[in-house]
Amino acid sequence: MRKVDATFSRFCVKTFTMTKEIVLLKLGGSLITDKDTPYTPRLDKLQELALEIKTVLDSRSDLLLILGHGSGSFGHVAAKKHGTRDGVRTPEQWQGFAEVRFQAAELNRYVMESLFNAGVPAISFPPSSSMVSNGRKVIHHNILAIRKSLGVHLLPVVYGDVAFDEKLGGTILSTEDVFTFLVEQFSPSRILLAGIEAGVWEDFPARTRLVKEIQLSEYGKMRAGIHGSASTDVTGGMKAKVEEMLALIQKTNGLTAQIFSAEENGLLARALLGENVGTLLKA
């Protein structure tokens, strides 16, 4: 895209969103799949979540939402088998790269079907066909298409997926990796990470001390008690998510993030409407 076109696009979106709130929402793989049973979606949960999203979007005309979702027992299982996140070089690894892409797209199809059935106008943007990274940092994306979808009130959907990478050949971009890029482009006010854990536990896996709020200056004191995922997660689990979010908050003025459970019906809607139902991360 020519520089003048990109500048004009940013101006149009800034003008359009001056009175809007932009929120990035991730539906975690642990929430929408059975992470311990390969290739198993939670269809009832997906439908429930789609209906909550529909209800909130209908009630909040000032809310612009970008939805992301994890790969759960689809992409993570295939990715672990082939070691895809660490790099792709050999013909066998490229075969694995294609398998991970296929499985991630299969889960995305279930997500999109749930949104469609709930009456949410959504359009999918697979990172594998639109993003190029360098050391898992996105360096190229056709961002204009996402901007245009927001402009006509379509819900953009991204997800954890494979991507061609200048340094690694190929890799996997987590939803958080994708969100890191989108934060730079859209300057959202909030990031919501919905999973099955109630939030960040200070003493995981005992789960007796839930942290309601984490400030950047306090994170070092509790870091030792936060661990990764109990299920297969090639992108790092809870500790990685917390530290990725805090890094974004540190460099993005006014941004907050929330990690919470959407297992109970209604919690997702309450989080979207601004309530802290889990752990709030802030500057």
Image: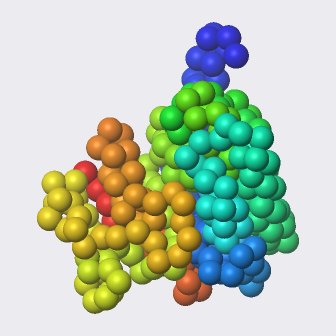
Return the x and y of residue 198 as percentages of the image width and height.
Answer: 42, 80
Q: Quadrant of residue 263?
A: bottom right
Residue at x 80% of width, y 68% of height:
110
Looking at the image, residue 226 sits to the left or right of residue 52; the answer is left
Please determine whether, in this image, residue 125 is positioned above or below residue 10. Answer: below
Query: Which residue is at a point 44% across and 54% down the rendered structure image?
Result: 190
Quarter location, residue 129: top right
The colour scheme used here is rainbow
Percent x, y of residue 23: 52, 53
Residue found at x 22% / y 54%: 216
Q: Position of residue 164 (x, y in %)?
A: 67, 35
Quarter of the image where one finds residue 121:
bottom right
Residue 257 seen by the camera? no
Q: In the displayed structure, would residue 62 be above or below residue 4?
A: below
Please tell me which residue lies in front, 255 or 126.
126
Residue in front for this viewpoint, 92 or 227: 92
Picture coordinates of residue 3, whole percent (x, y)? 62, 11
- Name the foreground residue: 37 vs 92: 92
User: Compared with residue 270, is residue 89 higher up or lower down, i.e. above or below?
Assistant: above
Image quarter where the N terminus lies is top right
Q: Is residue 162 left or right of residue 222?
A: right
